[in-house]
Image: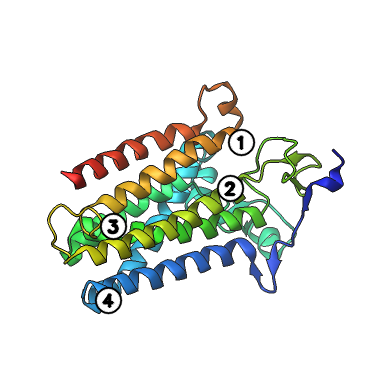
Amino acid sequence: MEILSYIVWNPSLSIGPFRWYSLCWLIGLALAYLVVKRLYKEQHIKDELFDPLFIYCFIGILIGARLGHCLFYQPDYFLTSGQGFVEMLLPIHFGNDGSWLGRTFGFFFTGYEGLASHGGTLGLMIALWLYVRKTQLSLWTVLDNIAIATGITACFIRLGNLMNSEIIGKVTDVPWAFVFERVDQLPRHPGQLYEAIAYGILFVLMWWLHKKGMSVGKPQTTGNVLQVGTGWYFGFCLTYIFTFRFFIEYTKEIQEAFEASMPFDMGQLLSIPFVVLGVWCMVRAKK
């Protein structure tokens, strides 16, 4: 097929003063904030217990996602020199890019280039555990509330990856293939779009199940796994996302050269424990 048969993709990295990637992150987090705020209101949880939740989540996701990328995908760079270690912790890169900072101090700001979703998930879980210890709320209630909102945030994060032409798919001849001009002139699977659609569907499904659970009976109804607080939503969210992530990796290019010799790439290996945890949470909820 001719290249004109495919979707040629080369959008601007920014819209006005904002980078598309950062904007998608902010939109995803803001929507999740509104969703969880509504869930807290439905469950009559005090506003003062909700207020610190966003800070815990934001810091947990950012630190976890950054460390996850550096430790899982590029440990040979970030852990073998003092310069790499500093770049892991701070949003800078050492060198001279022609800017005033680069010429004067030998480094320039880049933002955090490299964030791993598996690390972000683990960081979020640790942050929620700390949040629960401070607020004395039920851990399963908090995890379920966050799980219901997770799909919308994950959807926008992957749309940000699409706008950045990163996490590209393998070469293919499917008619909906994207030619990421910023990368090369080859038609590829739009893996970011596949994930964004899947996570958008997850959010709609989770919200529908939540509403269905509310209509079954009071929050303490025995045996109703669709009530928030059983851990079922959290388990379903993990199982759905990371099962899909495992199989969608077959359409994506490896991120680091060392993965080429592995039977499963790093994304697949890291997904397995989350799937196991998710299934365990769902079984526990039914019991």
| Amino acid type indicated by mark 4 | Lys
Q: Is residue 199 left or right of residue 159?
A: left
Q: Is residue 171 above or below residue 56?
A: above
The answer to whether 26 appears left or right of 193 in the picture is left
Cβ–Cβ under 8 Å for marks 1 and 2: yes
The colouring scheme, among rainbow, by chain, secondary structure or one colour, is rainbow
Callout 2 amino acid: Tyr
Q: Disc 3 marks which residue?
A: 144
The residue type indicated by label 1 comes to Thr
Residue on which disc 1 sits: 251
Q: Quadrant of residue 256 in the image? A: top right
Residue 109 location (% of width, % of height): 61, 60
Which of these two is toward me, 136 or 34?
A: 34
Structural distance between the alpha carbons of marks 4 and 2: 33 Å
Question: In the image, what residue occupies the spot 41% across and 57% down?
Answer: 205
**Could you tell me residue 277's position as x and y percent?**
29, 40
Q: Is residue 80 visible?
A: no
SS for callout 4 = helix
Residue on which the image places disc 2:
194
Estimate the x, y position of residue 120 in percent, counting from the top left: 42, 50
Q: Which of the two labelled residues, at mark 3 and mark 2, occupies the earlier sequence position?
A: 3
